[in-house]
Amino acid sequence: MNHHTTTNAITAPSSLLEQIALKHFFVQTLQTQNRDSLDFHDVSVWAIESALKAAFEAGVQAGQQAALKEKTKKA
């Protein structure tokens, strides 16, 4: 992705983001195509909601996995 991110941004694997974009928005790639018809999409609010929920759930799962790894390191 070619947009600006802050230094404190948490990064997710781009494959995960692309899977969410494809499933919820039917967007084939998150790479800039330099064509308005490919870079801008009409998206319903319910698709945005479902994509945000999917991203949130992925974050929860990643956090649980990280906590489990940390817990097993200490044991």
Image (spheres, grey):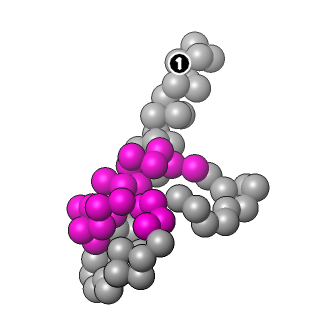
Q: Which residue is drawn at the image coordinates 32% and 86% (left, top)?
A: 42
Query: 30 or 57, which lies in front?
Result: 30
Q: Is residue 57 left or right of residue 13?
A: left
Q: Which residue is mark 1?
A: 72
Secondary element under disc 1, as helix, strand or loop, is: helix
**x and y, in percent, of residue 62 in the image:** 46, 42
Please tell me whether residue 16 is drawn above or below residue 53 in the rendered image. above
Please name the residue shown 49% across and 29% down the image: 68
**Count of numbered marks:** 1
Residue 57 visible: no
Percent coordinates x, y for residue 34 in the rendering = 47, 72
Badge 1: residue crowd in 10 Å (few <14, some 14–19, many ≥20): few
Residue 61 in magenta stretch: no
Amino acid type, mark 1: Thr
Q: Which residues are magenta?
A: 11-33
- Which residue is painted at 52% across and 25% down in the image? 69
Q: Quadrant of residue 53?
A: bottom left
Tell me if residue 19 is in the magenta stretch: yes
Residue 33 position within the rendered picture, expressed as x and y whole percent measured from the top left? 43, 67
63, above or below 73, in the image = below
Q: Quick one: which residue is furthest to the front in this view?
A: 35
Residue farthest along the top direction in this orientation:
75
